[in-house]
Amino acid sequence: MKKLNILLSLIVVLTSCSGNSQNKLKRYEIKSGIVKYTTTISGKVIGSTITGSGTESVYFKDWGAVELKEEQSTQTATMKFFGKKKTQITSTHTMNKLDNGESYLVDFDTKQIFLSRDMAMDMTKIFHPNADAGDVGKSMLESVGGKKIGTESILGYSCDVWDIKGAKQWMYKGIVLKMDITVLGLRTLTEATSAKFNITVPSKNFELPDFPIQKQEGFMNNADFETDMDDMDEGMDKVANMSFKEWKKLVTEDDPEMQEMSDKELRQTYDMIQKMIKIRKEN
């Protein structure tokens, strides 16, 4: 029952997340790289004039299975009240690392690191274990209403230009080299200033600060997750051969939350599970 509940929760997450693959996890169509970005922010929001700028560094290897992003930015908001001007300056420093499904979030304010699992990466391990990174990325963009509207060169790399509900992304083999988004009058423009691919990325670029690590409740490391995956494969095979009636009896037997669901909700959940199991088997 525990394994089935894990499967159910993962499927729910899948409906709101996107990701790429690992068997060796292949998030990008490029093995390794270092990309540097600059970001500018400008616009007016609820009477405030906002400007900002920032820099970001991205280091990745193993087709994106291991990746570290570090960003530093400053944002200035200027407001006027009864003829008086008030200025507020906010600075941020963030760092995120992905390591084959393990997700590290560095909080420089509290000097802590929060460790959890990256559901987007885990979803692909489960349902797209051998998928092509490019095909998965394209399907992901299309699933959220994205449309490819052309190609354009960024830093000498031929990028696919995608329009996603008014936001634009310039993608090179799964890697965003430019992004232009306007939300509620606030425009954020991020552009790569340098990009080097298929190079040896020094190990020091993946090092985290020496802060205490706080694990999310119920956290599984990669070794435990892979073991759980093997058990889950067996569970999937059993569920795939169950009728709706058999499955309903199983999941409602000792789960109060499932018992409260209507037949319609249970049927929808059952159909979703069967669909996801089919996708995994096809890949």
Image (cartoon, helix red, strand yellow):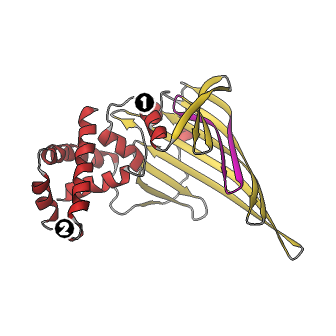
> Height in image: 143 above or below 257?
above
Left or right of 8, for residue 103 = right
Residue at (33% x, 55% y) in the render: 12
The residues bearing labels 2 and 1 have C-alpha atoms spaced at a distance of 38 Å
Residue 75 figure quarter: bottom right
> Height in image: 268 above or below 88?
above
The quadrant of the picture occupied by the C terminus is top left
Residue kind at label 1, given as amino acid type: Asp
Residue 267 marker: none
Which percent across, then down, holds residue 248? 14, 59
Left or right of 206, for residue 54 = right
Residue at (53% x, 54% y) in the render: 210
* Residue 27 visible in the displayed image: no
Residue numbers of the magenta segment: 173-192
* Residue 138 visible in the displayed image: yes
- Residue bearing the label numbered 2: 255
Residue 135 marker: 1
Which percent across, then down, holds residue 271? 23, 50
Residue 36 figure quarter: top right
SS at mark 1?
helix
The quadrant of the picture occupied by the N terminus is bottom left
Front residue of this view, candidates 99 and 11: 11
